[in-house]
Amino acid sequence: MNTKQGQEELAQMIRKESERLLEEIGKSVKHTKDIIWLSKWCMSCKFHNDHGARPMCNRWNARIVRPFYGRPIWEKMELKGREEKELVVADIDWDRKWREISDKIVEWAVEKVNGGYPYFCYTTTE
């Protein structure tokens, strides 16, 4: 460790481990759809579209989600070369709150999204 060669070997080991971890993470990452936090202006925007229980923004092809919603769905994943399992987020349930928060607080947060102003892409339905 105190020699130049020892430091270079350690740096090489760290680089290899970093590359291995990045490759492993890249294999396990699931792409999620884009989301937009629901603003009080979204409902009157011409790009707003209700798909049943799933409001969407047609401008950005993104799901519109209420603040405080989005509960992670955890899954146990086996680690290669080990007998242990690790908890990872397998998906996100956008229809459930991530904490037990009253609907009154959620509605208050909807009013405050983007400082109470419409998003820059807002266009009236008229």
Image (cartoon, grey):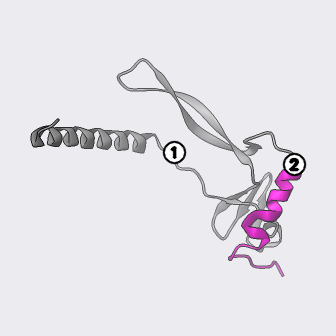
Q: Residue furthest bottom?
A: 126
**Residue wearing tag 2:** 103
Residue 91, by quadrant, is top right
Residue name at image x 72 percent, y 61 percent: 56
Residue 22 in the figure: left or right of residue 108: left
Neighbor class of circle 1 (other Cα within 10 Å; few <14, some 14-19, many 20+) is few
Nearer to us: label 1 or label 2: 2
Residue 73 in the figure: left or right of residue 116: left
Q: Residue 73's spot in the image, x, y percent? A: 64, 36
Residue 57, compared with residue 19, is above or below; it is below
Residue name at image x 64 percent, y 64 percent: 61
Neighbor class of circle 2 (other Cα within 10 Å; few <14, some 14-19, many 20+) is few
**The N terminus - image quarter:** top left
- SS class of the residue under badge 1? loop
Q: CA distance from mark 1 to mark 2?
A: 30 Å
Q: Nearer the viewer, residue 39 or 5?
A: 5
Q: Residue 42's spot in the image, x, y percent? A: 78, 68
> Who comes first in sequence, dot 1 or dot 2?
1
- SS class of the residue under badge 2? helix
Q: Residue furthest top?
A: 83
Q: Nearer the viewer, residue 62 or 2?
A: 2
Residue 117, by quadrant, is bottom right
Residue name at image x 57 percent, y 37 percent: 90
Amino acid tagged 1:
Lys
Residue 97, by quadrant, is top right
Amino acid tagged 2:
Asp
Magenta region: which residues?
A: 104-126
**Residue 30: mark in rendering:** 1
Residue 113, compared with residue 13, is above or below; it is below
Q: Residue 107's spot in the image, x, y percent? A: 85, 56
